[in-house]
Image (tube, grey):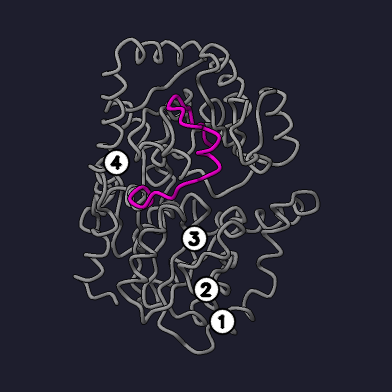
Amino acid sequence: MGVLTYNIFLFLFRIGIAIASLFNPKAQLWIRGRKDIFPRLRAAFAHKPAVIWVHCASLGEFEQGRPLIEALKTAYPAHEILLTFFSPSGYENRKNYQGADHIFYLPADGASAAREFLEIVNPALVIFVKYEFWYYYLKKIKYREMPLILVSALFWEKMSFFKWYGALQRKMLTRFDHLFVQDRESGRLLSAIGLGDRITVSGDTRFDRVAAIAAVPAPIPELERFLDGNSKVIVAGSTWPADETLLARVMDALGADWKLVLAPHEIDEKHLLQVEATFPQAVRFTRFGTGPSAGNVLLIDNIGMLSRLYQYAHLTYIGGGFGKGIHNTLEAAVYGRPVFFGPVHQKFREASGLINAGAAFSINDAEGMLEILRGFNNNPSLWQNSADAAAAYVQQNRGATETILGYIREKKLL
């Protein structure tokens, strides 16, 4: 891809977003969130503060960047944190996040937009998280000699950076002063294209995030009343219909002495009604009374609780493995619980790591999960070994945040 092709891509993207906004709510948010963006930025930064700019594509990247944002806020209190998002799923969910001083959509890439943005914000340090490469922003940052690092990055051989047609993408990588990658394979690939002198294999900052959450467990009294002392609990997070159908079969086979806490990925009323049709005995969290429930399925119909739910589990299940891919496994593993998910997990390094450690299990159907559960029941040490392996895997992979902070201190970037 050359610059001309990239500009054509940007042009077509804007047209596509404009058309999609006529019927797609997320596209509408994408456009609305950027309305009058530069006057709003000028007002926010009129006092010319010292700024650390952290950019995330979406919500998942934010969760990876969050430990670093909060560590930077503590280490450099005189600096203001600017957090930007590309997508509505990131901005709309975290626009009230207290760890940043300013939260905005990133203006669409372009030579004039990037120049104006940097003139207004004038960041002392720029941090991009995982996957986000905008040519003009990177070019202007380099031109203005602003320190620029990439964190929690993950690369694989099929990416365009490593293909004959990826010259522009490779050029974008050279704009970074340093790249902190999650694994050795990413480091090997970058070294092969001449970036070996600016790479650190630091790991994934999400391990630091989930460990920090688990270190200060927050109780959920309503959930404790629902469980009523029952230790046979499956907590299933970010589920989709295929996951819910599988779990219904598992619960039917396990019997009434097991309880299921189900947190669907989508909690609109239509989907909640579908879940209730699949689990007629389910009670919604927001409708749960003050006494024990006669049912054995609690349906979580709000957001923001998932990472706290897993502490109550005997077993955990992560949704998405029968669709585009699984969701966050580390939030469950950190509590030392066996983790189950469907077969679509190959793009997620931590899923493979948990499987290899004996902490997680990829299943194709309900019978596959039940077979493993029967093994746990017949030999409780198998469950314990898996639980211990889950906790150990998370603990062994902590430390990325401190590695990045150490680099910033050593190079005196702030």
User: How crowded is the residue under tag 3: few (<14 C-alpha within 10 Å), some, or many (20+)?
Assistant: some
Q: Is residue 223 above or below residue 259?
A: below
User: How crowded is the residue under tag 4: few (<14 C-alpha within 10 Å), some, or many (20+)?
Assistant: many
Tell me the quarter of the image containing the C terminus. Answer: bottom left
Q: Is residue 238 left or right of residue 152?
A: right
Q: Is residue 391 left or right of residue 26?
A: left
Closer mark to the observer between disc 2 and disc 4: 4
Q: Circle 1 is placed at which residue position? A: 44
Depth check: give the residue in front, 278 or 53.
Answer: 278
Distance from disc 2 to disc 4, alpha carbons, whole Å, reads: 31 Å
Closer mark to the observer between disc 1 and disc 4: 4
Q: Is residue 155 magenta?
A: no
Q: Is residue 234 magenta?
A: yes
Q: Residue at horizontal 57%, vertical 29%?
A: 323
Q: Quadrant of residue 157?
A: top left
Disc 2 is placed on an element classified as: strand
User: Percent position (x, y) of residue 62?
Assistant: 47, 56
Distance from disc 1 to disc 4, alpha carbons, whole Å, reads: 39 Å
Q: Residue at horizontal 52%, vertical 52%?
A: 59
The amino acid beneath tag 3 is Trp
The amino acid beneath tag 1 is Ala
Going from N to C along the chain, the mark reached first, 2 or 4, is 2
Q: Circle 4 is placed at which residue position? A: 394
Going from N to C along the chain, the mark reached first, 3 or 1, is 1
Going from N to C along the chain, the mark reached first, 3 or 4, is 3
Depth check: give the residue in front, 80 or 147.
Answer: 80
Instruction: Give me the disc on residue 134.
Output: 3
Magenta residue span: 213-237
> Residue extending furthest right?
22
